[in-house]
Amino acid sequence: MCGIRFNVPSYHILIFPTLTTGVATLINSIQQSSEDPKKVKIHVLVCGKGSDVTALREYLQCYGINETHLIELVHFDASFLGEDLKKAWQRSFSIKRLTSDCNYARTYLYRLFPDLSRAIFLDADVVVKQPIEILWRTTLAHQAPLFAVPISRTYIDDDFLTDVVSPLYAQRYGKPLLLTDHLFNAGVMVIDFEFYRKYNLIDEMEFWLKQSNKSSERLWKYDSQSIFQLTYHGLWTRLDSKWNCKDLGGQEQQQELIDKASILHWSAPPSSITQEEVQEQVYGSPIAPKCILTE
Ligand SMILES: *[C@@H]1O[C@H](CO)[C@@H](O)[C@H](O)[C@H]1NC(C)=O
Ligand SMILES: *[C@@H]1O[C@H](CO)[C@@H](O)[C@H](O)[C@H]1NC(C)=O
């Protein structure tokens, strides 16, 4: 007797949806644009209760997407953290709309995916228009702990409490925090897990979490995203902005920008097109679910 043998996937994509909306479109877009979808494995993180895994599975099936050896749902259960850390993360949320365990789950990648050495991390509000393999290969050639697209904001503009954060940074790392350095958008990241493990970055993330937990004033604005910006300060490498195209400009340039984008980040400010508009732009028409979704 022998089982079915699958090719081992060579490319790994992580999707950490804070919202379910968009996940099916995203998965379709990755598979449709891929050079060889059989080599691309998509790992979708589900936060919350076990019933949320069932709900996501049903939602995906409504869009004709089943779990296979190429699509896995990974349950993030915050209970492995211990109460103290879990509470500290939950207390760290300043923006209601971002309150989800998925928001800090990204700091525990090393535990969630112990077998991966690198992966492309995508927010659920993006669509992929160029083969994802191209992004993988271009970044593989220039090894770096993390690749992302820079944004115009710096540590100063992004409301880091620099009077407190700068000395802490200098003390811990023996080098200054360069406050006018640009930050990156965390919606599309290529992450080297080997580096993450080797330097035990989770200790750095939890160090910053504990600092924010003990401070009476807010040390930054965007919770785990801000912690990522500190941990990867001076370590990340710029990606071409076509890999996270989120500034769609005015009406006239919009179509041109959408056409040029390799990955379109549709709900990130300042762009503001709806998911239906994205589907129309990318596929020619909105995609309807094949069954009735119970929310
Ligand atoms: C997905 O699974 C359902 C139920 O098991 C099955 O009826 C359907 O044909 C499958 N769809 C695909 C695209 O494989
Ligand atoms: C967070 O702060 C609370 C209250 O000061 C404290 O009891 C708790 O141990 C802290 N948690 C962490 C992970 O540092």
Image (cartoon, grey):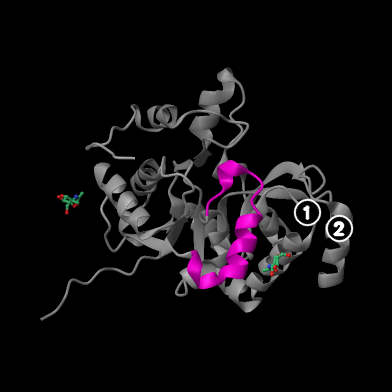
The amino acid pointed to by label 2 is Val
Expressed as whole percent of the image width and height from the top left, the position of residue 270 reads 63, 31
The residue at the far left in this view is 1
For the C terminus, give its image quadrant. Answer: top left
Which residues are drawn in magenta? Answer: 78-100
265 left or right, relative to 208 = left
Magenta stretch encompasses residue 97: yes
The residue wearing badge 1 is 219
Classed neighbour count for the residue bearing mark 1: other residues with Cα under 10 Å, few (<14), some (14–19), many (≥20)? many
Q: Main secondary structure of the magenta part?
A: helix
Residue 1 image-quadrant placement? bottom left
Q: Which mark is on residue 27?
A: none
**Label 2's element?**
helix
Residue 91 image-quadrant placement? bottom right
Vertical placement of residue 28 versus 69, above or below: above
Comparing 116 with 156, the one in front is 156
269 left or right, relative to 232 = left
Q: Residue at x 29, y 68 (%)?
A: 7
Confirm or deny contact between disc 2 and disc 1 (CB under 8 A).
yes
Q: Residue at x 44, y 57 (%)?
A: 48
Vertical placement of residue 134 versus 88, above or below: above
The residue wearing badge 2 is 164
Q: Is residue 59 visible?
A: yes
213 left or right, relative to 57 = right
Classed neighbour count for the residue bearing mark 2: other residues with Cα under 10 Å, few (<14), some (14–19), many (≥20)? few
